[in-house]
Image (cartoon, coloured by chain):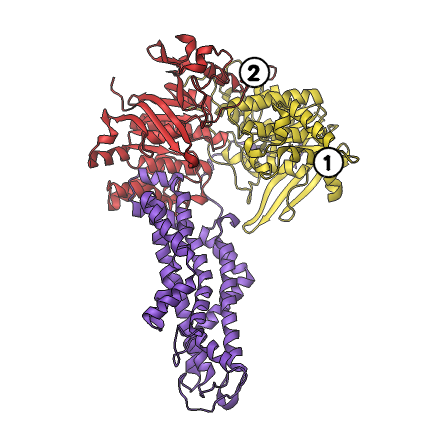
């Protein structure tokens, strides 16, 4: 800090020639997405979750190909334990390689989980948007419908659907979708109601934007983060739903494999060999945990209030 | 010219070389870059500046409520001779709400919506009471406080919740909470910004009367030069984390000596200006405090800027008793400045 | 006299939960001539924003008629309705929530151009650059996102967006309240310049009486859903008649300590009553220092003081 009496070079007291342009933006700044990504990657626990999810997916794809055994081949000796005869996880009661069955099963279970979650998210967004945006009688009818459907336990509905349509992959997906969209619809409707009177939406109306344009271009990006998070958290829910339904015999049927099927077989034979339930249980738990950890991290990262 | 902010004596609060930095992902934000000011008993000092200039952070630093980390506070904060930066949290707890109180801007977020107003007001007294006080005594104190701040039907209001109070009433409740322990210093952070103009004028009258009666020192943080004119004895203008000019209130309006102060005064429409002349406006926007200017913080926007302004931060030049300005135009080597002639004359004010 | 936009007996009521009715705008007459700036002032709950939004069709009126270029907006055919939507624009208060943070500046400005198919291809891009320059921003800002700009700059983006569709009437709904003092002057100057350049008509809504005085030709004062006084700008500020107007003007602190420091303002007593329960008769009667018996019983008529100055007050009948 100079003293008031210091003398300086006289030249310094010349009026400055060029005017600074203070309207240029100097600081490199982050978009919402960049900020969210950065925070997500810094979250170690969420990254562990993500890594595990990716690992599970990779193993689901290449796992069965790694071993020379087919998942439904009854060739070998039953009840072999870990590592015996080249079977990484041993064999089950019918001599089928558990490793191959586990990862074939992973394909089914993960596929169901992802498909159900995505379809429900999309359906829920559509229905919720229309309900919230247009309001009036459309909203009232849809909301009452949701209230009714919400009251019925999804298990009952799923069981009913499976009984009516017969077991199998396709009917399982339909059963899970039929009321799965409700929570997303409610979430989206709430967001739309909040956004409806925001100034930028009013501006869009004055600028001649169509309803579709307003909903999908203006409103959806504002809560897309929420939908993605809710979708990520729904995946383990559907994986578990499949496991449960298959366990009670209404889902995937053997010799097809899924985690639920393996759980069922494992429980039935656990007196004889523990690894038949231990491995599937372990993998299911890891899968659920990974999605939850990653989903939590995702929720924190995408939360606009936590933006730095 | 010997006296400066540093050597002047203040009996209630003297802040010296306050610096506050915040570490964030994008770098370090220098929110407060060396601020010094003081206040005496019974005085009202206005800290004036626009958003992001550092006035709120300075106020929060006095009460040590700046979160550290990510904040880093350095400097001396002498309250009645004691350096607050050296006190423990336990000692600070005794001071907050009792010796030094704060009135915040938005009464709705400051009041707990699930607690009755009476409970919230008396809680502050209970925290600092020297001995156990009975419930009836507490209630009586609260009702007296309500009377003092002009809350009607105090008996009934005591039991009400914040949502039952209007905006003006809530702010009165905040004032009651600030005064109940008879503090020596009150810091009011934009206390009337969120209020309607007729309610604002009621609040200002109230605060002024109370201040006069209780002789409490008041630091008033605001951006409204009308409010400053009404309330302040002395004014400090803050820009980009530094004080650019300090003076008694009349001097700031009659004889402003910093281009930013002049710019601010000229930006306000006045009764006399012919309405078809464009309003004087300061070009550009306030600087980014991640990377503050090397020299004077205001130089990028200043129409009188010289080369020295871009390269060296200006020291405080004394203009009069109690009137300082940090501007190179006041240096003896600066050309006879055309500041005075460039000031668009406002009715009744001699440049 | 041909008005650009006119409202007669305008009412906008909102029904809240529990069947309570909020009479935000209750029987308001407005008339704005082309090229004019009408200032609309009042405090919270007076309904000024609601008036603005209803005038341009964002809210549907509960009762009363609105005329744009002498045609009733409720009876416009599809094409004329589209014209009406385009030609009457609005600039909002909050620069943070009035533009979509997920769109680039270029897209924000082009939205109206695209919807109304005003320009295509190269001309469209030229038009975007032209608009940015008109509001004091520059070309390289087109690819940036709103969060990279300051409040004042975002407000400029909002102004450019409205100008893009070539309106003739713009509602300025508290356009400077959320901005710093030094930036307020920049924006007001900009609005003023644009008005001259493009022959715009403004309804300038604000609670900042000094700014309103600076920019308006005529001013209307609102209280709890009703207009209490209308006059030419100079007449209103130098010769206010309604007790509320007087109280309002007296409450403004004057930025000059020699006057203001020792002045004890004639403080208006009482609280602003809730618009849910307006008092019967004159809405201002609960706070009026000059109230008479009739004020509590009957709503006051609109009394002409001169051909351009009207007061709704029993004191002048």
Could you say where residue C314 lies in the image, as x and y percent from the top left?
A: 42, 11
Is there any visible trace of residue B25 in the rendered image?
A: yes
Residue that numbered label 1 is attached to: B126
Give B329 or C274, whichever is nearer the viewer. Answer: C274
Give the image location of residue C156, x and y in percent. Answer: 40, 36
- As helix, strand or loop, the secondary structure at mark 1 comes to helix
Picture quadrant of residue C236: top left
* Residue C144 in view: no
- Separation of marks 2 and 1 at Cα, in angstroms: 36 Å
Above or below, A43 relative to C208: below
Above or below, C126 against A38 in this view is: above
Chain bearing mark 1: B
In this rendering, the answer to whether A217 lies above or below B133 is below
Mark 2 — residue? C265
Q: Colour of chain C?
A: red
Q: How many marks?
A: 2
Q: Residues within 10 Å of mark 1 (few under 14, many from 20)?
A: some
Task: Tell me which chain appears purple.
Answer: A
Image quadrant where one finds the N terminus of chain C: top left
Q: Quadrant of residue B18?
A: top right
The foreground one among B246 and A98 is A98
Check the image and report above or below for A47 versus A141: below
Q: Which chain is yellow?
A: B
């Amino acid at each position: 800090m100079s003293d008031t009496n210091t003398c300086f070079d006289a030249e310094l007291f010349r009026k400055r020639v060029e005017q600074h342009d203070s309207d240029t933006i100097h600081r490199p700044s982050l978009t919402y997405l960049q900020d969210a990504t950065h925070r997500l990657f810094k979250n170690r626990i969420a990254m562990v979750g993500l890594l595990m999810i990716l690992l599970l997916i990779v193993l689901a794809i290449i796992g069965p190909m790694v071993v020379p055994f087919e998942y439904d081949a009854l060739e070998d000796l039953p009840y072999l334990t870990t590592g015996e005869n080249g079977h990484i996880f041993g064999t089950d009661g019918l001599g089928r390689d558990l490793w191959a069955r586990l990862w074939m099963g992973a394909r089914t279970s993960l596929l169901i989980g992802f498909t159900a979650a995505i379809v429900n998210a999309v359906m829920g967004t559509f229905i919720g948007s229309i309900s919230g945006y247009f309001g009036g009688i459309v909203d009232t009818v849809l909301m009452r419908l949701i209230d009714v459907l919400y009251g019925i336990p999804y298990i009952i509905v799923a069981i009913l659907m499976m009984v009516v349509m017969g077991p199998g992959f396709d009917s399982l997906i339909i059963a899970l979708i039929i009321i799965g969209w409700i929570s997303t619809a409610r979430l989206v409707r709430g967001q739309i109601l909040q956004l409806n009177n925001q100034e930028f939406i009013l501006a869009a109306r004055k600028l001649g934007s169509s309803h579709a344009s307003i909903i999908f271009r203006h409103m959806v990006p504002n809560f897309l983060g929420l939908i993605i998070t809710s979708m990520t958290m729904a995946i383990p829910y559907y994986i578990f739903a499949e496991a449960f339904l298959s366990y009670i015999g209404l889902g995937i049927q053997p010799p097809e494999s899924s985690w639920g099927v393996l759980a069922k077989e494992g429980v039935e034979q656990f007196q004889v060999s523990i690894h038949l339930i231990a491995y599937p249980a372990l993998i299911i738990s890891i899968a659920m945990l990974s999605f939850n950890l990653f989903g939590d991290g995702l929720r924190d990262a995408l939360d606009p209030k936590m933006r730095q | 010219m010997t006296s400066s902010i540093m050597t002047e004596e203040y009996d209630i609060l003297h802040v010296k070389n306050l610096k506050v930095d915040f570490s964030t992902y994008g770098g370090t934000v220098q929110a407060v870059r060396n601020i010094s000011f003081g206040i005496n008993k019974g005085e009202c000092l206005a800290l004036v500046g626009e958003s992001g200039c550092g006035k709120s952070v300075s106020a929060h630093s006095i009460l040590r409520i700046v979160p550290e980390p990510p904040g880093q506070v350095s400097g001396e904060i002498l309250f009645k001779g004691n350096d607050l930066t050296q006190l423990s949290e336990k000692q600070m707890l005794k001071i907050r709400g009792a010796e030094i109180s704060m009135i915040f801007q938005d009464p709705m977020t400051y009041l707990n919506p699930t607690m009755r107003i009476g409970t919230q007001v008396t809680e502050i007294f209970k925290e600092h009471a020297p001995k156990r006080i009975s419930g009836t005594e507490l209630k009586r104190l609260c009702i007296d406080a309500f009377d003092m701040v002009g809350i009607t039907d105090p008996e009934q209001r005591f039991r009400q919740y914040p949502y039952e109070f209007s905006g003006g009433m809530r702010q009165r409740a905040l004032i009651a909470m600030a005064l109940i322990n008879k503090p020596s210093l009150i810091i009011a952070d934009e206390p009337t910004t969120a209020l309607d103009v007729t309610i604002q004028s009621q609040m200002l009258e109230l605060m002024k009367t109370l201040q006069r009666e209780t002789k409490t020192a008041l630091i008033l943080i605001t951006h409204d030069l009308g409010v400053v004119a009404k309330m302040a004895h002395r004014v400090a203008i803050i820009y980009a984390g530094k004080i650019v000019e300090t003076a008694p209130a009349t001097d700031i309006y009659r004889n402003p000596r910093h281009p930013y102060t002049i710019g601010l005064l000229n930006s306000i429409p006045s009764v006399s200006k012919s309405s078809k002349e464009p309003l004087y406006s300061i070009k550009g926007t306030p600087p980014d405090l991640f990377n503050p200017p090397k020299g004077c913080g205001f130089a990028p926007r200043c129409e009188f800027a010289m080369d020295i302004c871009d390269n060296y931060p200006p020291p405080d030049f004394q203009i009069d008793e109690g009137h300082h300005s940090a501007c190179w135009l006041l240096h003896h080597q600066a050309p006879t400045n055309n500041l005075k002639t460039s000031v668009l004359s406002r009715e009744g004010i001699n440049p | 006299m041909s008005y650009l936009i006119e409202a007669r007996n305008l009412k906008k009521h909102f029904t809240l939960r529990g069947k309570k009715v909020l009479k935000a705008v209750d029987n308001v007459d407005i008339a704005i001539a082309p090229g004019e700036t009408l200032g609309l002032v009042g405090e919270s709950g007076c309904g000024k924003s609601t008036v603005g939004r209803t005038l341009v069709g964002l809210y549907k009126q509960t009762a009363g008629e609105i005329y744009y270029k002498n045609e009733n907006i409720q009876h416009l055919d599809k094409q004329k309705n589209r014209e009406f939507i385009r030609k009457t624009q609005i600039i909002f208060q909050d620069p943070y929530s009035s533009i979509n943070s997920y769109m680039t500046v270029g897209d924000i400005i082009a939205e109206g151009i695209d919807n109304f198919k005003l320009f295509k291809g190269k001309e469209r891009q030229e038009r975007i650059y032209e608009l940015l320059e008109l509001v004091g921003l520059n070309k390289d800002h087109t690819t940036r996102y709103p969060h990279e700009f300051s409040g004042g700059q975002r407000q400029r983006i909002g102004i450019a967006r409205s100008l893009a569709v070539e309106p003739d009437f713009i509602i300025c709904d508290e356009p400077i309240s959320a901005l710093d003092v030094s930036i307020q002057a920049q924006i007001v100057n900009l609005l003023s310049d644009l008005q001259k350049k493009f022959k715009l008509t403004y309804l300038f809504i604000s609670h900042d009486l000094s700014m309103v005085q600076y920019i308006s030709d005529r001013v209307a004062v609102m209280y709890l859903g009703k207009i209490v006084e209308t006059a030419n700008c100079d007449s209103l500020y130098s010769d206010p008649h309604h007790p509320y107007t007087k109280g309002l003007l007296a409450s403004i602190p004057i930025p000059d300590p020699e006057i203001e420091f020792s002045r004890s303002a004639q403080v208006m007593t009482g609280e602003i009553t809730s618009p849910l329960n307006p008092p019967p008769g004159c809405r201002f009667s609960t706070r009026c220092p000059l109230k008479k018996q009739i004020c509590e019983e009957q709503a006051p008529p609109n009394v002409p003081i001169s051909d351009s100055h009207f007061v709704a007050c029993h004191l002048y009948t």
